[in-house]
């Protein structure tokens, strides 16, 4: 007859297995732009400081000053701009092909690049579904604020 493991050992193993199912380990990775957790360093990615943004791109190549917008929960990678053409101007900056716009943000008085969710870009998709899919999970489409020049952009919900 084969000895059976103690009940306490089985209970711990069962609890560990259930915990792994309920709380999977999430690994942050750089460079994936599939609407995941927002940690890839592109526009809209979470950040604590500007150097968290645009990995793999020489900062001097970006057409504007890189910024981590701290008025957005968990930070928001972007850069200053003068026109829409300043956004996605550098190879590797916007690899997913979804347009960005240069827009004021709230009452900062500055213009920044944001993923656009304007009607012409989202097509038949719901604008919040578009942001959740092509920006990052939990992002929503809303006005950038900033007065008459505001745009519809994807930001954390």
Image (cartoon, rainbow, N blue to C red):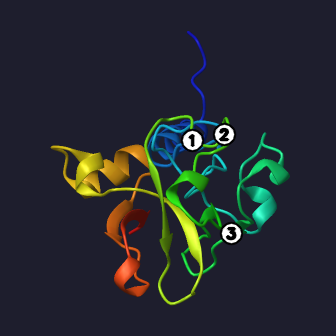
Q: Earlier in the sequence, mark 1 or mark 3?
A: 3
Q: Position of residue 46 (x, y in %)?
A: 62, 61
Local crowd at mark 1 within 10 Å, few (<14), some, or many (≥20)? some
Q: Position of residue 125 (x, y in %)?
A: 19, 46
Q: Quadrant of residue 127?
A: bottom left
Label 3 environment density (alpha carbons within 10 Å; few <14, some 14–19, many ≥20): many
The tag on residue 94 is 1
Label 3 element class: strand
The quarter in which the N terminus is drawn is top right
Q: Is residue 50 left or right of residue 117?
A: right
- The residue indicated by pointer 3 is 68
Q: Mark 2 = which residue? A: 29
Quadrant in which residue 29 is drawn:
top right
Of the numbered discs 1 and 2, the one sitting upstream in the chain is 2
The Cα atoms of the two marked residues, 2 and 3, are separated by: 19 Å
6, 114: nearer the viewer: 114
Residue sitting nearer the eye, 101 or 34: 101
User: Residue at point 20% right, 44% down?
Assistant: 123
Q: Position of residue 70 (x, y in %)?
A: 63, 78
Between tags 2 and 3, which lies in front? 3
Q: Residue furthest bottom?
A: 107
Q: Considering the numbered disc 2 on the image, is that residue within a helix, a strand or a loop?
A: loop
Residue found at the very far top of the displayed protein? 1
Real-space CA distance between mark 1 and mark 3, rounded to the nearest whole angstrom: 17 Å
């Amino acid at each position: 007859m084969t000895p059976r493991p103690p009940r306490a050992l089985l209970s711990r193993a069962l609890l560990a297995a259930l915990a792994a199912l309920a709380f999977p380990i999430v690994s942050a990775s750089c460079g994936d732009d599939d609407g995941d957790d927002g940690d890839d360093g592109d526009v809209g990615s979470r950040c604590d400081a500007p150097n968290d943004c645009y990995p793999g791109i020489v900062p001097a190549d970006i057409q504007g000053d890189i910024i981590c917008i701290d008025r957005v929960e968990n930070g928001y990678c972007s850069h200053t701009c003068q026109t829409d053409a300043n956004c996605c101007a550098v190879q590797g900056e916007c690899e997913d092909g979804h347009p960005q716009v240069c827009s004021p943000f709230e009452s900062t008085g500055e213009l920044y690049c944001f993923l656009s969710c304007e009607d012409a870009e989202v097509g038949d998709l719901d604008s919040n579904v578009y942001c959740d899919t092509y920006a990052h999970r939990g992002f929503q489409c809303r006005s950038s604020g900033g007065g008459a020049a505001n745009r519809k952009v994807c930001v954390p919900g």
